[in-house]
Amino acid sequence: MNKIILGTQWGDEGKGKIVDFYSAQMDAIVRFQGGNNAGHTLVINGKKSILHLIPSGIFHKNKTCIIGNGVVLDPEILLQEINQLKKVKALRSTKQLRISERAHVIMPYHKMIDQLREQAKGKNKIGTTGRGIGPCYEDKVSRQGIRVHDLIHPDQLEQKLKLILPYKNNYVRKLYQKKGLSFKKLFEQYAALGKELKPYVENTTELIWSFIQNKKSILFEGAQGTSLDIDHGTYPYVTSSNTVSGYAACGSGVGVRQIDEIIGIAKAYTTRVGDGPFPTELNDKTGEYLREKGHEFGSTTGRSRRCGWLDLVVIRHSQLVNGLTSLILTKLDVLSGLKEIKVCVGYRLNSKTTQSLPADINSLEKLKPIYEKFPGWDEDISQITQFKKLPQNCQRFVKAIEKKLNLPIFSVSVGPDRKQQIDIT
Ligand code: GDP
Ligand code: IMO
Ligand code: MG
């Protein structure tokens, strides 16, 4: 059985925790899009680790973690992550981590351009992570990107860099009056990084195919969330990749028919980092309560996350564009202590009601959520291990969401640790 686990909101739904949990049953775990804009947090026996590029299955023994062709990869960050994992003995062999030779490389000029653009935009900024994600995907699509294959072949790296660097230097000089980068320094640094990464690189399309042929199970790990998808998200306040299930096939080189299950992860409330529309945002005490109790501070940039009520229009949109087969609800424990819990079940837009997410940004900014209220519960639920032992109001809340979406919720998460997971049987 091959599964996709992905975010249904604006990222940080707890994908890392859930992928780690289900990796125990899988043979390979594949990242298929995004880059180190992602921050996936795992807590295993009280020990916290944050992964930005390496799939969240890496803490299990005898699993193959794969960085697919759809990922944009910053070699410096990846090597830091590799070295950190070697230190804690999670990564013991190059067999555990395989990198696609087709993945694109984030170069220093990508990061520079990302940050300069954001500064220049001022209050109209996207609020990117500044990791060079957008500019790298732009180069991929405009066919001037550097791929991992180039990185590990110095002659090809040299040739490509000689063509592209003058163009990039010219761009930052003319548009932002910034000094360009030195070819010699850049080439030497990146050729050295390529040499270090080479033992991990292979044709991952063939590798994944061999897993499929041998009836091994593959878990595809999404990054970001559906509302950050370049096509289906709240454009232009999105990331630069497709985060939806369809891209799991494209970004790892498998056919769509190889995927059996598509599991959406939804936080029991909503958060968003960066700018852009957020209909259920709470700029009040409840919002602060969620931020403090849920430790809603970015795993990548440390920025404070915007918080609000659960938005079922957003989840329903995700259900449609991903073809979700089930849902896992996370951070249910964070809602404990609230007298009343609100859930958005539709929007009001110019005196009309709708249950679908409008495409244009002006409408998205004008939406007024329609809420349904649920009675809360006081008990700390973080140590509960059986669904039927959860407070009645908590069980009702989960069941009501399941019913409204007509989508099975087969598990809930009640704390950050691997153990704090309740399967609903
Ligand atoms: P991801 O990007 O989707 O992997 O999510 P992040 O790791 O960026 O953010 C999720 C945060 O919530 C992390 O700090 C997790 O440790 C934490 N977390 C995950 N699941 C739960 C849960 O059920 N309860 C609580 N309290 N924290 C959780
Ligand atoms: P994980 O995988 C939350 C957001 C940024 C910004 C927008 C564009 O941990 O859920 P980018 O740097 O990608 O060009 O920024 O996307 N963003 C995320 N928000 N979680 C993430 O990843 C994100 N990755 C990007 O904050 O609003
Ligand atoms: Mg995250």
Image (spheres, rainbow, N blue to C red):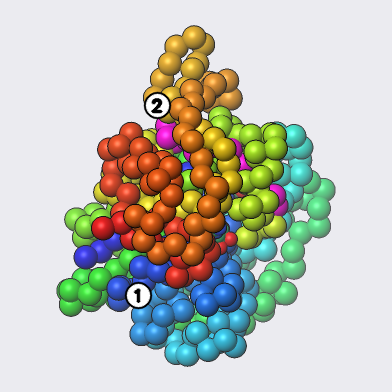
Q: Amino acid at mark 1?
A: Ala
Task: Say above or below: 355 vs 128.
Answer: above
Classify mark 1: residues with Cα within 10 Å, few (<14), some (14-19) or many (20+). some
**In magenta stretch: residue 128:** no
Q: Is residue 87 left or right of residue 420?
A: right
Residue 268 in sight in this render = yes
Residue at 55%, 82% (x, y): give it.
85
291 or 272, nearer to the observer? 291
Range of residues picked out in magenta: 303-314
Residue at image mark 1: 24
Q: Quadrant of the C terminus?
A: bottom left
* Quadrant holding the N terminus: bottom left
Marks 2/1: CA distance? 36 Å
Q: Residue at x 74, y 48 (%)?
A: 116
Q: Residue furthest top?
A: 351
Residue 312: within the magenta?
yes
Name the secondary structure under disc 2. loop
Give SS at disc 1: loop
User: Where does the image place residue 309, in percent across and percent down from the top left?
Assistant: 54, 37
From the viewer's perspective, is residue 106 above or below residue 46?
Answer: above
Mark positioned earlier in the residue sequence (2 or 1) = 1
Residue 231, quarter of the rendered image: top left
The picture places residue 281, in percent across and down from the top left corner, at 61, 34
Q: Nearer the viewer, mark 2 or mark 1?
A: 1
Residue 166: percent from the left, percent from the top? 68, 58
**Residue 77 image point, x, y percent:** 61, 71
